[in-house]
Image: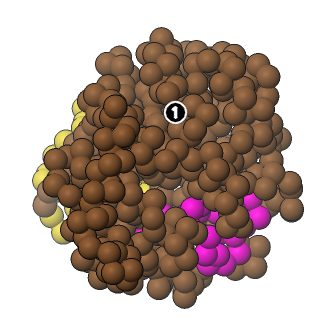
Chain colours: A brown, B yellow
Amino acid sequence: MSTAVQAAAASVMDRVAARTARKHHPLNVHFDLTYRCNERCIHCYLDHEDHGELTTAEILHVLEELAAAGVLTLTFSGGEIFLRPDLFEILAAARRLHFDISLKTNALLVTAERAARLRELGVRSIQISVYSSDPAVHDAITKVPGSLARTVAAVPLLVAQGLKVQLACPLMQQNLLAYRGVMALAGKLGVPYSFDPTITPMMDGSGGPLTHRVSTAALLPVLQDPVLSACHPRPAARADVALPSGKPVPALASAVSSGLESFSYEDIPCSAGHNSCYISPYGDVLPCVQLPQTAGNLRHQRFGDIWYRAASLEELRSARDSELPVCGGCEIRSYCERCPGLALMEGGDVLGAYERACEMAEQKAHLAGVAHPFSALHAEQAAAVGNGRASRNEHSCDQVQLVLK
Amino acid sequence: MSTTIPWQKNPLLAWREIDGETVIISPNDSVMHELNETGSFIWRQIDGRCSAAEIAGMLAAEYEVPPEDALADTEALLQQLVSRQLLVLAGAAR
């Protein structure tokens, strides 16, 4: 007989993630408690009206169901979670049920007293949205004067409690070059940071936020910046923040993070529907916040029934990267961060290719030294219009050279 | 390690038993720990009341192993869990 406890973070995390994904065990849940918000960010994909949020009792019941189903990590997000007057009641219930708890917030409503309460409730990490170190840029995005100052002021309150804070900075046209300032701000505050150029359509599929998205060509200088590619997002003093892997987390990434990401998934695009899912403030269960395929509603169904019986989840689980109709044979697949949700919202097919992912993959492959990178989608398009492969490659390289000037 | 002192799980931990193995996350250091089947059996018995000797007795009965082996394994695991701050003395403050 041998009893054992293992704690090599990378191997344990990867093993647990891979095993639960393979067995479709629900491990991670991203739970939006409200879509209401005290900011009006120009790129936001949410409808901020309250259309009948889950009550406190309903949320506590959902948490009990999630615990019974074996869910371990919960990320509470919104909207702005501190607009729920029952937030601490919800967190206390999550603590009693032994969840790993992470939060996403703009921190406008964080006080020293609330920070202390978060610590008492065992919250493990808090991600705070910051768009720039320049108040004019940040506040123009949030549409709330003074918001940067209030957000930044909250960080030391949380850090003083020993809470792990990370600045998260979506990159869009309005703040593309703000990343160095955010890095400096994070360094001053002693917290890690991350950047993400992913701007998504509204949850109803309309494309308003996409008008703020940075083109792949304009993003190229950022991708090339050695400061980002060096992958040193964390000041040394906070290096213990890295739960998942111990591997360096790219400073620039495209992911809807559950808080526990793994690089060990085999032949599936991501964890959505395999070991993670999303719950809306109205009780809808989706594979991911970016994948608008409602599998069921917790006001009328049990979580376990939805997770194990929803046809849409079964269909999603059957997909394999290597068998995707277009992308499966793509020569530059390894450079691609194809997202099934964006494939559905932007390309109309959860299994299909979409322009943005192909453009990004070609740019990344080019930066990595691949000669004439050409996605499978673009190859199909070129063939369809009778265009030669060479002409598309020349166009792609023209874009690169233009930006590099 | 005393065989008579009852231990309890650190109340700030996140943990779940998944397919017979227990996954534990400590919010203090964000490290994920994993217990195998017998480790999970011991973990289940840690309730703030049972001593190491009592847990070892249950382990010996469940897995039909010599009591002395069960006690040695139990004490070794408890020691590891305590050193990683996954256990605290029963009744101790956070």
Task: State the residue position of label 1.
Answer: A176
The magenta stretch spans residue A287: yes
The magenta stretch spans residue A153: no
Query: x, y (%) of residue A272?
Result: 47, 67
Query: x, y (%) of residue A242?
Result: 35, 35
Residue at figure coordinates x 72%, y 29% from the top left: A140
Q: Quadrant of the C terminus of chain A?
A: top left
Q: Nearer the viewer, residue B5 or A168?
A: A168
Residue at figure coordinates x 31%, y 19% from the top left: A236
Q: Nearer the viewer, residue B21 or A28?
A: A28
Query: x, y (%) of residue A215?
Result: 49, 47
Residue A249 sits in which quadrant?
top left
Residue at figure coordinates x 64%, y 50% from the top left: A211
Give the residue type that dot 1 points to. Answer: Leu
The answer to whether residue A222 shows anywhere in this view is: yes
Q: Is residue A197 above or below residue A189?
A: below
Residue at figure coordinates x 31%, y 41% from the top left: A401
Q: Nearer the viewer, residue B20 or A217?
A: A217
Badge 1: residue crowd in 10 Å (few <14, some 14–19, many ≥20): many
Magenta span:
A274-297
